Amino acid sequence: SLSSWRQRRDLCQNKRILFSQSNSQFDANDAPLSSYQQSFEQDSMLRTTMSVSRRQVRWSHRSIAGAAAPFKPWQQHMIECDGDYRKERHLEEHIGGPLYAHQSSLPRLPIPTLEETMQRFLPTALPLAKSEDEKASIQEACQQFPVEAAKLQARLVERGDVEMADTSWLQLWWNQLGYLQVRDSVVINVSYYFHFADDPTATTGTARGAAILFGAAEFRKKVCSGQLPAETVGKKKTVLCSTAYKYMFHACRIPRHDQDSYRIYDPSRYSHAIVARKGHFFSLPVCDPITGDPVALADLQAALEQIEALADASPAPLELGILTSNDRDAWADARNYLLDTGGVAMEQALENIESGAMLLCLDDEDPVSRRQCGELLLHGGMKSSSNRWFDKSIQIICTNNGKAGLLGEHSMMDGMPMVGLADHVTKTTYATAESRSPPAAGGVPVENIFAATQSTLDASDVPTLIGESKIAFSDWIGKHEINVQSFQGYGASFMKKAGYSPDAYVQMAMQLATFRLWGEQGGTYEATQVRPFLHGRTETTRSVSTESEAFVKCMGLSPNFFEKDAAAREEKVSLLKNAVNAHVKYIGNAAQAMGVDRHLFGLSMLVGDGEAAPALYSNPLFARSKTWRVSTSNLTHPRFENWGYGEVTPNGVGLSYSVHANHCMFSVTALKEQGFSERLCHHLEESLLEMQALVEIDQPLRSRL
């Protein structure tokens, strides 16, 4: 019953207090307040003179207060992060377990030599030259670079050895400049989506949502207790850095002027999730407050059905979620206004949202196609955009007809850790969750988060702020389009039998497709993780090379599916092999943090005021080579229908892909005015079919499926 559940919660609260008083291993001195944490506390005191009583009220109103047994309480209920992974390292030591057992022994991110970087860089830039003069200019700049950048290299090495000796020399720059200081909306620009395969045992939104919440709660327990095994990669089982997992559950980006922050909340004190339906936001417990185990599946589903009924029968609320879609400064202003207007009730409501383990969006939608699902998952469209809180680290989206997916906020955590969560929740069908679930306990409490603030906000300027955000959002998503290429001709099995790396083979198909789209190659980025290194995130694999240039130019701007000239066929196949091998070599170096882009970025950050930068940095071809007209990433999962993200430059495309055994999936996001997405999907299919014809003629026996 609800009363017995609350008794367990109160018992848990008492245990948390006793544990905190007796815990001598985690001292407050180990966890100094960051500047953001201090400013948060100062801002809170300015908002009310009753800071002590306000804090008592806030604690008593937490949906789930108390320490679940598997979790060690933190010294603070919340930590505000400024992008420096080192400041939250004490949590890894405090939590412990297999997840963080290897952190202290991980190697640090290496720094290539200047000569190595120039040797790898030049072949990726030359194919993009528009004249012989540009080629000569970039070659001269590369020759001069080791001399001109010698002092910068020394500074970078010193930064790695001294200032950042206990972390990655890159991570602080990358987290802050690449994410938290960016003022654009996170919608499309930052967030990424996973489109899950259907669950045949859950055909409604509430059933699918309950099963995913159940699976996510199981995964949460492993992550927040540190009992999840650390990820490994490759035949040698190389351990990957686990630092990003701290920003997965109970986490939320916070808008601030100039630079955002990230809040993470103590999972021993918070065990609730947020559920959104038609712009209403509710809180409900998803875990037992003592054991950390998931709430019974039947209770979760009953609560979701209750939320759906309440929202569907209620008048339309103020669409507060749409505020999170605006540019970061506008959203920061709006958030401050909400707090000033709504007072303690609004502060409690926002904390409830931010501290939730995750957000489940029950959308009143019935999408069918991958394109429809992609648009709904990436931004929600005008109908469901208010059913989002785009700052939450995890948003699970479920529709009336049981379609489901995930929207991830990218600032402090890349996509691969989130794949672990997605893998678990997609394995956890409704039927399997039912088999693992405890018996129903008579229901769980549901709380309408913003109910106490509604009348106050109605009489304020909040409706005007919402209207402005809706206009900006409509304009932004209206400029974009998503197209999907579901290529069913063949997949990784064919490529492997023919002797090619599937990823590199598809990368060359994308080079050919974009070459035919634009009549020239464009700078191409493939994300490559460098998490074998402490606090490593990603490096760029550059797909443009002299070898890929030779291949696409030989293939030409028009397809020839029936190349009868044996010498011409032999040349094309040879050039394809060379291009694939060159890509494999580059990505191998990038995976060892021996690419060029992070190194060149780091050096550029150390040019002092009044100093002349190396000539390479002002070279037009250098700028063109790192303008990512094609932003690609490969994520292949057997229970993903598709996945995607936005373009990174206005004249480019976001091109996500998956290479399955017998088919390939592509999602293309681009500005509508460019007219790229549909044509690129056509060229992708065309290129893959033409390459198949070449390979089959070259190796007729080995290539049969």
Image (cartoon, grey):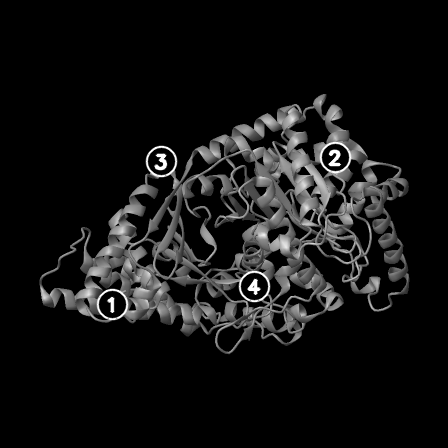
Q: For numbered disc 3, what is the local secondary structure? A: helix
Q: For numbered disc 2, what is the local secondary structure? A: helix
Identify residue type, mark 1: Ser
Q: In terms of depth relative to the viewer, which is nearer, 504 or 342?
A: 504
Q: x, y percentage for residue 232? A: 55, 71
Identify residue type, mark 4: Leu
Which quadrant holds the C terminus?
A: bottom left
Task: State left or right for residue 111 relative to residue 128.
Answer: right
Mark 2 near mark 1, Cβ–Cβ under 8 Å?
Answer: no
Report how far apart the C-alphas of labels 3 and 1 lie in the structure: 40 Å
Residue that label 2 marks: 339
Residue that label 3 marks: 673
Identify residue type, mark 3: Glu
Report how far apart the C-alphas of labels 1 and 4 lie in the structure: 43 Å
Q: x, y percentage for residue 192? A: 51, 49
Residue depth check, mark 3 versus mark 4: number of the one nearer the observer: 3
Mark 3 near mark 1, Cβ–Cβ under 8 Å?
Answer: no
Residue that label 4 marks: 170
Residue depth check, mark 2 versus mark 1: number of the one nearer the observer: 1
The outermost residue toward the left is 565
Q: For numbered disc 4, what is the local secondary structure? A: loop
Residue depth check, mark 3 versus mark 1: number of the one nearer the observer: 1
- 10 Å crowding of disc 2: few (<14), some (14-19), many (20+): some
Look at the image and tell me whether residue 119 can be seen: no
Q: Earlier in the sequence, mark 4 or mark 2?
A: 4
Report how far apart the C-alphas of labels 3 and 4 lie in the structure: 36 Å
Residue that label 1 marks: 703
